[in-house]
Amino acid sequence: GQQLNQSPQSMFIQEGEDVSMNCTSSSIFNTWLWYKQEPGEGPVLLIALYKAGELTSNGRLTAQFGITRKDSFLNISASIPSDVGIYFCAGQSYPGGGADGLTFGKGTHLIIQP
Amino acid sequence: GAVVSQHPSRVICKSGTSVKIECRSLDFQATTMFWYRQFPKQSLMLMATSNEGSKATYEQGVEKDKFLINHASLTLSTLTVTSAHPEDSSFYICSARDWSSGGAGTQYFGPGTRLLVL
């Protein structure tokens, strides 16, 4: 099956620093999504990417859909304490009308040191 | 964004009993919902795709007779864990696909249900 490699696995940064994480896939996806999950809660959608090469921002967050359709990155600028959590990338194949679920990366645990 | 709810938020049951978890899309209709399972410190793993008005599609290795899925309406899917055992203890999360964004649609997740089987 499809696999997503998400890195880094964890990040320890200082408040105010920029953050960058990425996902690569062994196969092509037609949609890339980035979610944030806090303990005991479901994932919350941050950014959705639907076209290869697409660059989308949501406040301090920016994500890009790689040209090859096999990778995506998420950047967080000027991190603040509430950015703490686990960030997941997810890919969707959507083969022409299909209803596939998402394939998730293993997550990046973001920890912010005061 | 769209809102998805789950009920109950947590449940504790005895081994051998069955547990039903509900997933509802509150402000949109969802012909397709998905059920995921997440073990501690791990990622979400897709269990099955729930299709309104038809049978669910299960991922490889997921027992359809143990995890019964019913998608009775455009806003409700239920997952029943039958004859639960301690190894079924996990965080179960549903998602619903909102097609209004076009393309492949966008999946919105519920808050999850924590199941503990004693």
Image (cartoon, grey):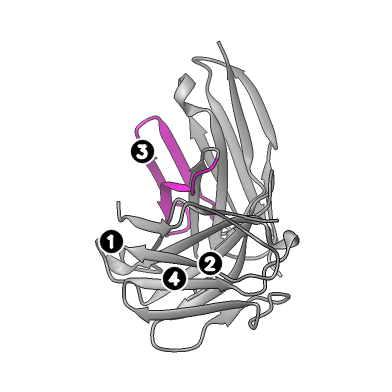
Horizontal side, residue B19 vs residue A44: left or right: right
| Separation of residues labelled 1 and 3 (CA atoms) | 24 Å
Amino acid type at circle 4 is Met
Cβ–Cβ under 8 Å for marks 1 and 3 = no
In the structure shown, which secondary structural element does the residue marked by tag 2 occupy? strand
- Read off the magenta span: A40-67
In the displayed structure image, the side of residue A60 where residue B69 appears, left or right: right
Q: Chain of mark 3?
A: A
Label 1 crowding class (10 Å Cα cut-off): few <14, some 14-19, many 20+? Answer: few
**Residues under numbered marks 4 and 2 in contact, where contact means CB atoms less than 8 Å apart:** yes
Whether residue B35 is situated above or below residue B65 in the rendered picture: above
Mark 1 element type: loop
Closer to viewer: mark 2 or mark 3? 2
Q: Are marks 1 and 2 on the same chain?
A: yes
Query: Going 63% across and 81% down the picture, which residue do you hit?
Result: B64
Disc 3: which residue: A58
Q: Which label sits in the foreground, 3 or 4?
A: 4
Chain for disc number 2: B
In the figure, A50 relative to A63: above or below? below
- The alpha-carbon separation of the residues under discs 4 and 2 comes to 7 Å
* Residue A89 appears left or right of B96: right
- Which amino acid does the dot numbered 1 rest on? Leu
Examine the rendering and report whether any part of residue A95 can be seen. Answer: no
Nearest the eye: A106 or B112: B112
Residue B79, numbered circle: none
Amino acid at pointer 3: Asn
Same chain for mark 1 and mark 4? The answer is: yes
Label 1 belongs to which residue? B26
